[in-house]
Image: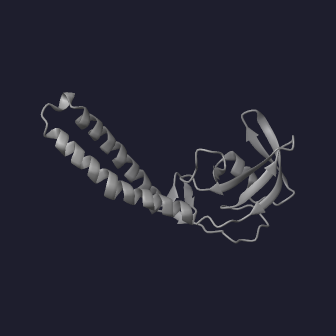
C-alpha cells in the first residue's frame, strides 16, 4: 500500500490540522514523555512496585503517551495536506465550509476536514462521513440525500465557502 494511504483511503489533512498534530507530537515527545519517564524512574527507586501508585500510574500513562505518539506519527507520515483556502466556491470539495438546510428549514454549517481533525462539537466533519460524502461535489441550490439512522434525509445546499484552514 502506498505511504499516502491509510485503510485504503488517502489521509487528507488541512494545513492547520497537520500543524496541530505536529505540535501535539512535539509536546508529547519533548515535554510529557520525558517528565513521565523521570516520574517512573523515581517511583521505581522507592521499592515495592506492586503497591506503588506513582509507578503503576506512570507506566500506564507512559504506554498511553507512546500509543498516541505512534498514532500521530503514522497519521503525519501518510498525510496528504490539501489547502483549498481561497478556492472558488462553486462546488463542495475537501476543506469546504458548507451551510445546508434540512426539510424543516433548520440550517447547519459544517467544515469538511480530515479524519484526524474532528472536534468534540459537530462543526467539523470527516470527509469520509456519510454527511460529507453526500455533500461532496454538490453546488449551491443542489438537494442531496444523506443516509441517517432515522432514514434518508434531504438537505438543501445553501452556501459554500473556502476559508483558510491554516
- What residue lies at 33% left-to-right and 55% top-to-bottom? 31
- Horizontal relation, residue 36 to residue 138: left or right: left
- Horizontal relation, residue 25 to residue 79: left or right: left
Q: Nearer the viewer, residue 6 or 159?
A: 159
Q: Nearer the viewer, residue 125 or 35?
A: 35
In this rendering, does residue 4 appear at all?
no
Query: What percent of the width, then of the height, locates residue 66?
Result: 34, 48
- Horizontal relation, residue 156 to residue 42: left or right: right
> What sort of colour scheme is used for the picture?
one colour
Q: Nearer the viewer, residue 49 or 133?
A: 49
Query: What percent of the width, then of the height, locates residue 48?
Result: 14, 31
Query: What percent of the width, then of the height, locates residue 80?
Result: 54, 65
Q: In this picture, is 107 found above or below 5?
A: above
- What residue lies at 65% left-to-right and 47% top-to-bottom? 129
- What residue lies at 66% left-to-right and 56% top-to-bottom? 112
> Which quadrant holds residue 16?
bottom right
> Which quadrant holds residue 104?
top right
Quarter of the image that includes the C terminus: bottom right
- What residue lies at 74% left-to-right and 52% top-to-bottom? 109
> Which quadrant holds residue 58?
top left
Amino acid at each position: 500500500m502506498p505511504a499516502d494511504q491509510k485503510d485504503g483511503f488517502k489521509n487528507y489533512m488541512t494545513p492547520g490540522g497537520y500543524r496541530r498534530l505536529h505540535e501535539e507530537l512535539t509536546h508529547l515527545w519533548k515535554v510529557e514523555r520525558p517528565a513521565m519517564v523521570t516520574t517512573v524512574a523515581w517511583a521505581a527507586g522507592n521499592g515495592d512496585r506492586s503497591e506503588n501508585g506513582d509507578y503503576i500510574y506512570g507506566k500506564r500513562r507512559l504506554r498511553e503517551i507512546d500509543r498516541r505518539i505512534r498514532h500521530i506519527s503514522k497519521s503525519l507520515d501518510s498525510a496528504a495536506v490539501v489547502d483549498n483556502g481561497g478556492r472558488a466556491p462553486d462546488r463542495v470539495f475537501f476543506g469546504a465550509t458548507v451551510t445546508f438546510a434540512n426539510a424543516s428549514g433548520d440550517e447547519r454549517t459544517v467544515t469538511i476536514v480530515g479524519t484526524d481533525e474532528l472536534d468534540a462539537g459537530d462543526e467539523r466533519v470527516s470527509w469520509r462521513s456519510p454527511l460529507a460524502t453526500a455533500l461532496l461535489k454538490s453546488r449551491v441550490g443542489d438537494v442531496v440525500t444523506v443516509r441517517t439512522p432515522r432514514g434518508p434525509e434531504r438537505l438543501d445546499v445553501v452556501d459554500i465557502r473556502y476559508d483558510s484552514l491554516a
